[in-house]
Amino acid sequence: MLLLPMAANAYDIAVRNADGVTIYYNYINNGAELAVTCELSTRYTGSVVIPEDVTYENITRKVTSIGSRAFYGSSYLTSVIIPAGVTSIGRNAFEDCCRMTSITIPNSMTTIGDEAFRGCSALASITIPDGLTRIESGVFIDCRSLTTITIPNSVTSIGGRAFAGCDGLTSFTTPNSVTSIGDRAFAGCKGLASISIPNGVTSIESGTFMYCSSLVSVAIPNSVTSIGDDAFTECNSLSFITIPNNVTSIGKGAFANCSSLTLITIPNNVTSIGDASFANCSSLTSITIPNNVTSIGNGVFDGCIALTSIKIPSSVTSIGEYAFSYCKGLSSFTIPDNVKSIGKSAFRFCSGLTSITIPNGVTSIDDEAFYGCDLSVVISKIENPFVIGTDVFSNNTFLNGTLYVPAGTIDTYKATDGWKNFMSIEEGLPLGVPDVRNDNVDAIRRYAIDGNVLTKTHKGISIIKTNNGITKKVMKK
């Protein structure tokens, strides 16, 4: 081998391999072994075969490592063969080797550093050796031509952004040994249509599958207990998904902009649904919120234009800003009795909504809460009306709708800012239904006060149609 002069602060020795390619090395492990490195002013080109050992000044040393940034920016490097005995590849070792189409990694390899192959946009396939236990963060980020990758059963975790931007991946088999998948691990994998998630994984982290626009379905295992922020945002081909019963939280924007999503079941153990979690799911037609949820966050269903049915449990105490904005398909909606606050623009432009009942416990209604709704009937059960903004309701509602208020409160409503803008305010309930004081009647159809059909009796006021054709307002104590 031909010995070349040493350049200070860049490498310790430079030796040509059997093909005449100059490779630069640093001494490691007290000078007993060598790590491949680079020369600051040049880059590797063509095919590079790294030897198993190097003799320099009559001393032979094993090559055991590829140093950090060793081949960084070698844009004309086409292939690399790493010999047996090398155990580690450093951080960013092959970053931006944009013409490298193949690399051979030996079975001796146990560590591949963060972003080691970042931007290797021509690399089509790679095999990870059996000795590796972790795919580090960003290892293959922006490897856009990568279509095939083999992950061994020795791997237990996949780091954040590990495969982000790998457009060429159409499917991915995750070994059963994997117990954790990092945030944004597959973000932007636009060609990924299917993926398996092992049963040992306990959480879908933030942005794990965001922008995977070809992803059709995902089987989430029962071991998962949480779905992170933006986990599936803009998965535009995802039409349905089953969330396992062990999941207790759904993060912000988790399914936002999933425009093909028509069916999703939220399990009863869920206690938290993040802001905008289903925003702009324009094909979603119905959804049931489980009984443990206490608040509907900001923008949760904003832009769900096909949503016609939603069930909100009595446990909910607040409805956030833009929660149902632009849900044009909603024709009826029951606000639970325990709700205390209705956020800004909560039902803005729900143009199909014609009536609404506001519970007595509500203490605040923010600006534009019902703006753009063509409400003909507003039933307020609030016994002590508070000031609301002039744009809580649309002008059309103020001019043509009727506000129904509790008995004995009409004068207070007519004197209270916001409410007094209604041209028509009446005490009692709509439809002119006569009052009765008990529920000892035979009903062929029963309705809630807001017009929703009831399947059984419940405490409080309801409207029934009797078997003789009479409609009555009844109260069950």
Image (cartoon, rainbow, N blue to C red):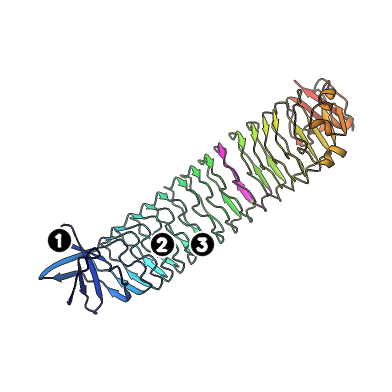
Of the numbered discs 1 and 3, the one sitting upstream in the chain is 1
Disc 2 residue crowd, few under 14, some 14–19, many 20+, Cα 10 Å: many
Q: Nearer the viewer, residue 233 or 219?
A: 233
Is 309 placed above or below 313 here?
Answer: below
Marks 1 & 2, CB-CB < 8 Å contact: no
What residue is pinned by disc 3?
192
Of the numbered discs 1 and 2, the one sitting upstream in the chain is 1
SS type, badge 3: loop
Residue at 44% in and 45% down: 202
**Which mark lies nearer to you, 2 or 3?**
2
Q: Nearer the viewer, residue 131 or 419?
A: 419
Quarter of the image containing the N terminus? bottom left
Q: Report the side of 91 relative to 472 (left or right).
A: left
Q: Percent from the top left, x then y, of residue 399?
A: 87, 38
What residue is pinned by disc 2?
140
Amino acid at pointer 2:
Phe
The overriding secondary structure of the stretch rendered in magenta is loop
Q: Report the side of 295 relative to 30 (left or right).
A: right
Q: Nearer the viewer, residue 309 or 1?
A: 1
Q: Percent from the top left, x then y, of residue 128?
A: 34, 62
Disc 3 residue crowd, few under 14, some 14–19, many 20+, Cα 10 Å: many
Q: Is residue 445 magenta?
A: no
Amino acid at pointer 3:
Leu
Of the numbered discs 2 and 3, the one sitting upstream in the chain is 2
Residue at 31% in and 57% down: 132
Stretch in magenta: 263-285
**Which mark lies nearer to you, 1 or 3?**
1
Amino acid at pointer 1:
Ala
Residue at 80% in and 34% down: 378
